[in-house]
Amino acid sequence: MKSNSISKTILLFSVLIIVTLGMSGCTILQAENLYDDAKNVARMIASYDMPKGYSEQFAVEMLGYQVVSLIGPEESSHIYLIQVPQGIELTPDQLQQARIMDNSDTIEPKQMQFVENRPVVIRGQSVTLVIQEGLNSENQPYRSATALFEGRNGPALVNISAAITHWDQALVDAFLASLD
């Protein structure tokens, strides 16, 4: 059991590395094709309504993973959609324990504090939204909301994070409801 938990933590850390590499320019799609390519990668996971002020930052398809990053009007506001290969099983509790979706510019995980679990519906599925708070890379308080759901081609994760001063719960709720 402990080996299984370690394997899943390594998997979650690997997803963070993929996201970080995409943010740093490695395996990034060309800017002139970013919108179309990000939408194409996103369609493999789920369609969505773009929140006001957000745009596609990058999309990566690598090693069976699909990652789409949306950036908000503030540099600290991000939405990630990540789909993992079939056969990978993750739970909200493992996400909470791993505490890796930290929105920083480094691959070092930040400690996040659990705030609450909220029931939500994504793609017609009742799932748990894990809310956490911590400090971003500029030591500003921020909030993160993460949920696991079944994407179009496998297990998927959505992570929405922003500085607490810019947190918009209505935006979070609308984005989650738009995932199809």
Image: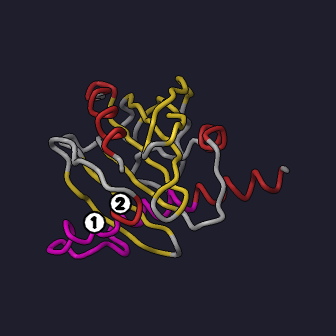
Q: Quadrant of residue 160?
A: top left
* Magenta residues, dominant SS class: helix
Q: Quadrant of residue 152?
A: bottom left
Q: Secondary structure at mark 2?
A: strand
Label annotation for residue 95: none
Report the Cα–Cα distance between label 1 and label 2. 6 Å
Instruction: Categorize mark 1 by other alpha carbons within 10 Å: few (<14), some (14-19), many (20+).
Output: many
Position of 62 with respect to 7 (left or right) is: left
- Image location of residue 164, percent across then percent down: 34, 26
Position of 133 relative to 153 (above/below): above
Q: Earlier in the sequence, mark 1 or mark 2?
A: 1
Instruction: Categorize mark 2 by other alpha carbons within 10 Å: few (<14), some (14-19), many (20+).
Output: many
Residue in view at x 65 percent, y 38 percent: 93
Residue 118 painted magenta: no
Instruction: Provide the residue designation for mark 2.
Output: 68
Q: Which residues are magenta?
A: 14-42
Q: At label 1, which amino acid type do we have?
A: Ala
Position of 29 relative to 126 (above/below): below
Q: Secondary structure at mark 1?
A: helix
Position of 55 relative to 139 (above/below): below
- Image location of residue 40, percent across then percent down: 29, 69
Q: At label 2, which amino acid type do we have?
A: Val
- Image location of residue 146, percent across then percent down: 48, 40
Q: Tags 1 and 2 in contact by the CB under 8 Å rule?
A: yes
Position of 80 relative to 140 (above/below): below
Q: Which of the two residues, 89 or 9, is positioned nearer the viewer here?
A: 89
Q: Which of the two residues, 120 or 165, is positioned nearer the viewer here?
A: 120
Q: Total marks drawn?
A: 2
Residue in view at x 44 percent, y 66 percent: 66
Residue extending furthest toward the front: 124
Position of 6 with respect to 130 (left or right) is: right
Instruction: Provide the residue designation for mark 1.
Output: 38
